[in-house]
Image (tube, rainbow, N blue to C red):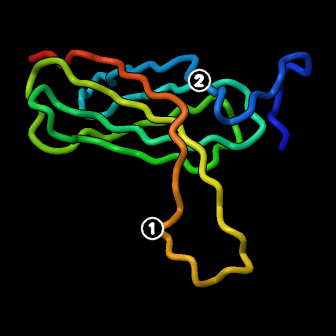
Amino acid sequence: MDYFFADPSEPRLPPDEVTIRSLQADLWPDKRRLRVYLEVDLSQKRPSAELKVYNPQGKLVAEADVIESMSRRMEMNLHLRGDLQPGEYTLEAVVFFVDLPDLENPHLEPDSIERKVVDTKKQTFVLTEE
């Protein structure tokens, strides 16, 4: 697996040592979209991530899944759903790895595939009235 512009002197970590280096949430001026920046350690395997945004009442208002990213730096826009209220929102990131089953075993159920969570991080942002 090659990462574009990776520092050749930086070691690639095994999956269980990978951590989230940075998590940022920037609200767009329309207050309906959130720019999310996620950076993880350079790893030996491609990382996956789950991103969720919760409103001040704890209700899920946006989510995205990143499956086996080819880059350690991920940037995306999440669209906030529903009637948005002013207050503090929480972005939660979970980074994990999945060991895919042997393709020679076609009878394996998708529910039996386990994800190995290696790090989680939360970032809050405030949606104001205007």
Mark 1 = which residue? 111
Q: Position of residue 52 (x, y in %)?
A: 33, 38
Judged by depth in the image, the label closer to the viewer, 2 or 1, is: 1
Which mark is drawn over residue 19?
2
Q: Amino acid at mark 1?
A: Asp
Which mark is drawn over residue 103?
none
Image quarter of residue 3: top right
Q: Position of residue 127 (x, y in %)?
A: 18, 19
Which residue is nearer to you in this view: 33 or 60? 60
Position of 62 relative to 75 (above/below): below
Q: Are marks 2 and 1 in contact (CB under 8 Å)?
A: no
Q: Residues within 10 Å of mark 2 (few under 14, many from 20)?
A: many
Image quarter of residue 5: top right
Q: Position of residue 40 (x, y in %)?
A: 61, 26
In the image, is 50 to the left or to the right of 43?
left
Label 2 element class: loop
In 3D space, how far apart are the residues under numbered discs 2 and 1 (Cα atoms)? Answer: 25 Å
